[in-house]
Amino acid sequence: MRFGVQTALSNTTPDELRPLWRHVEALGFDWISIWDHFHAVGGGTRNLEAVAMHTALALETSRVRCGGLVYSVGYRSLAVLANAAAAIDQLSGGRVTLGLGAGYLRDEYVAWGLDFPSARDRLDRLEETVPALRALFAGDTVTLEGRHVQLREAACDPPPAQAALPIWVGGGGERRTLPLAGRLADGWNVPMATVDDFARKAAIVAATAADAGRDPAAVERSVGVGLCWDEARLGERFGARAEALRPSILTGSTQEVVDRVAAYREAGADWLFLSLRAPFDHDEVERFATEVVPVLS
């Protein structure tokens, strides 16, 4: 199992994020990622834009994978998303992993005048976007006539630094999203899932990969979890959702956290990401890196 950190972009500043990213990399984590929203998740509007902050992450670090978990395929045109990802990969020296999702926060779409189609249409767009991006990243000139993706001799030039930039799919929908990840993606992420939920969903990803003639092990499986060593601070850290999220938050003694992380590993997780929101607690992350990671790596 490998470890990373997902840094939320709500209610924070670049001056807070940059030292956090440097600290996380220095602690030995192998992954840092950002999310894609236009408003603060949980209420309010204060949220940094994802492409700009993904670029900053790439320039602020030198070793970690620089992930995006996940870009909504409904927020930007394919041209913007493809060329931005390729440019960030060039800036990072080939360290980008591009996560994609169908999008779900209707209020953000409405606020910015974006169409919010049915779940079926949003997932159809995602399913068309993954192979289109893969072809563009390969340096091909691409023509496609899909319902949602139309390209006319389009080229992503210059292409990414990586010969095959990894494309992940994020989400937990068992009817469409997980099978889509198994068939088409290089990796899959589910945020804030319990061990049992993760195990069930990971099995669906693996089964659909096998049905598609793929090696299930070729699809990296990851889970995002909360971290709060002091259980008395759960409400302070996670607000009104603390009780609902409790089963997917690491808390308690070092051994209790080790046991919980080991359970995710046994359930098939290749990666575990700590989902961090401002105000960021560097000491909590450092304790995880020094007391938990060495036991389980």
Image (cartoon, grey):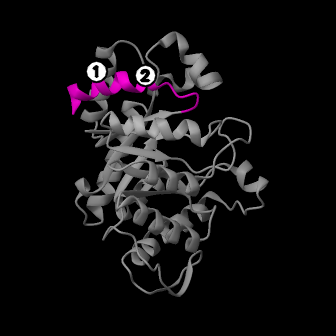
Q: Where does residue 272 sit, x and y in percent of width and height?
A: 35, 37
| Lateral position of residue 46 relative to residue 221, left or right | right
Mark 2 burial class by Cα count in 10 Å: few <14, some 14-19, many 20+: few
Residue located at (56% from left, 35% from top): 16
Report the magenta residues as a range. Answer: 277-297
Residue under label 2: 284
Residue located at (48% from left, 48% from top): 171
Task: State the image quarter where residue 215 is shown.
Answer: bottom left
Upstream in sequence: badge 2 or badge 1: 2
Compare residues 175 and 190 and report the one nearer the observer: 190
| Lateral position of residue 44 relative to residue 249, left or right | right
Mark 1 burial class by Cα count in 10 Å: few <14, some 14-19, many 20+: some
Q: How many dots with numbers?
A: 2
Q: Find out whether residue 9 is within the magenta segment.
A: no
Distance, label 2 to label 1, CA atoms, is 11 Å
Residue under label 1: 291
The reply to whether residue 20 is visible in this rendering is: yes
Compare residues 74 and 273 and report the one nearer the observer: 273
